[in-house]
Image (tube, rainbow, N blue to C red):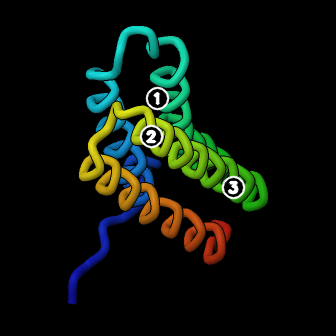
Amino acid sequence: MKKEKAIKTFRDLNVYQLAHELAMKIFEATKTFPKEEKYSLVDQIRRSSRSSSANIAEGWGKRRYPELFKRHLIDAIGSCEETKSWLLFSLDCGYLLLDSYGKLLAGYEELGAKLFKLHDHWRSFP
């Protein structure tokens, strides 16, 4: 039987690790976007992708209050969905190849599912 690692900080949460990893992939992908998109599409997609992980971290800091933690998970879900919308714009504008879009979208689909599961199964700490 595999022993689960104790969760001591938000960085120990698998959902946070995935959100952070995806945000970094967005950062790398947007480095190749046109300069004229720097203050519009690039800024928006980077902000929304980072917002998912930031909301998980902020919620973790408020975990003693389950409803506050869950509210931040809902905000993270919203940012996840927003990022998927910006990914579609990136594809339609020709800034992302279909393969890259598909991989990023699959990652955000997984993230959204994990966020929903954590939200629905969260128990408060004693």
The kind of residue on which mark 1 rests is Arg
Circle nearer the viewer, 1 or 3: 1
Q: In this view, does 65 lie to the left or right of 105?
A: right
- Where does label 2 land, which residue? 92
Along the line of sight, which residue is nearer the eye, 9 or 96? 96
66, above or below 32, in the image: below
Q: Which residue is drawn at 42% across and 48% down?
A: 19
Q: In the current view of this chain or complex, which residue is farthest to the left?
A: 1
Q: How far across and down, in percent of the image, does residue 102 sit?
A: 33, 56
The kind of residue on which mark 3 rests is Ile
- Where does label 3 land, which residue? 74
Q: How far across and down, in percent of the image, does residue 1 sit?
A: 21, 90
Q: What element carries label 2?
A: helix
Disc 2 from disc 3: Cα separation: 27 Å
Note whether residue 113 is visible.
yes
- Where does label 1 land, which residue? 46
Disc 1 from disc 3: Cα separation: 19 Å
69, above or below 92, in the image: below
Q: Is residue 22 left or right of residue 69?
A: left
Q: How far across and down, in percent of the image, does residue 89 sit?
A: 50, 38
Q: Which residue is drawn at 26% across and 22% down?
A: 32
Residue 113 badge: none
Q: How far across and down, in percent of the image, does residue 22 sit?
A: 35, 45
Circle nearer the viewer, 1 or 2: 2
Of mark 1 and mark 3, the one earlier in the sequence is: 1
Q: Residues within 10 Å of mark 3 (few under 14, many from 20)?
A: many
Point out the image quarter for the C terminus.
Answer: bottom right
Q: Residues within 10 Å of mark 2 (few under 14, many from 20)?
A: few
Which quadrant of the figure has residue 34? top left
